[in-house]
Amino acid sequence: MTAERAIQVLKFFFWVSIVVFYPMLISIYVTLPLFVGFAGLIFVLGLDEENYSYLFFSAVYMLNLEINLSLPLLLMLISALIFYNYVKEKLAILKLCKKCVYISTVLLINLIYFLLLAGYDFVTDQNSVNYDHLLVFSFIYDIIAAVLI
């Protein structure tokens, strides 16, 4: 095995461990950010570039997060797909600023997701997420992750 192949295998196992174990840590330590918008951004980038590893890892992360936090199943994927189908083309005016596109994508996916979640909570008369300052910190960490990409 060459050194280059070993690095690729290590990267693969690193991302698998992040996708599998980080949602479990979020369910234990509630102050960790959710990265809903960042996972949606990676999903949208995977759709744009036809990068199946981006699609797979982000979809598995979203599903794992929803299962571990007992959130409505597939709502994160649906919000990312709603953004991709209806909103993404309207962001064409920001094409010159790639970071601006990433930040607006993260913000809009977060907004769509939490609006869908609020609608779900209203219809089912439940309280899935506490809308407090921790959610604002999660949004800020999402934006930071989008800028660092």
Image (spheres, rainbow, N blue to C red):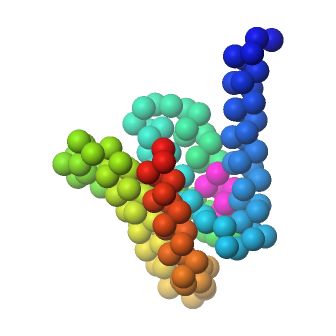
**Residue in view at x 25 percent, y 43 percent:** 95
Does 93 appear above or below 56?
below
Does 68 appear above or below 40?
below
Q: Find residue 24 and report its horizontal and vertical position in percent.
A: 77, 61
Label count reads 0
Residue closer to the observer: 143 or 49: 143
Residue positioned most to the bottom:
125
**Residue in view at x 78 percent, y 70 percent:** 28
Q: Quadrant of residue 109?
A: bottom left
**Residue in view at x 34 percent, y 58 percent:** 104
How would you classify the magenta stretch by its main secondary structure?
helix
**Residue in view at x 61 percent, y 66 percent:** 33
Q: Is residue 86 among what the camera can see?
A: no
Residue closer to the observer: 28 or 112: 28
Q: Find residue 105 and report its horizontal and vertical position in percent.
A: 38, 55
Give, as a single range, the part of the protein colored magenta: 61-67
Residue closer to the observer: 78 or 95: 95
Residue 63 in magenta stretch: yes
Q: Find residue 14 and report its horizontal and vertical position in percent.
A: 73, 39
Q: Find residue 35 and report its horizontal and vertical position in percent.
A: 56, 59
Residue positioned most to the top:
2
The N terminus: image quadrant: top right
Q: Quadrant of residue 131?
A: bottom right
Residue 11 in magenta stretch: no
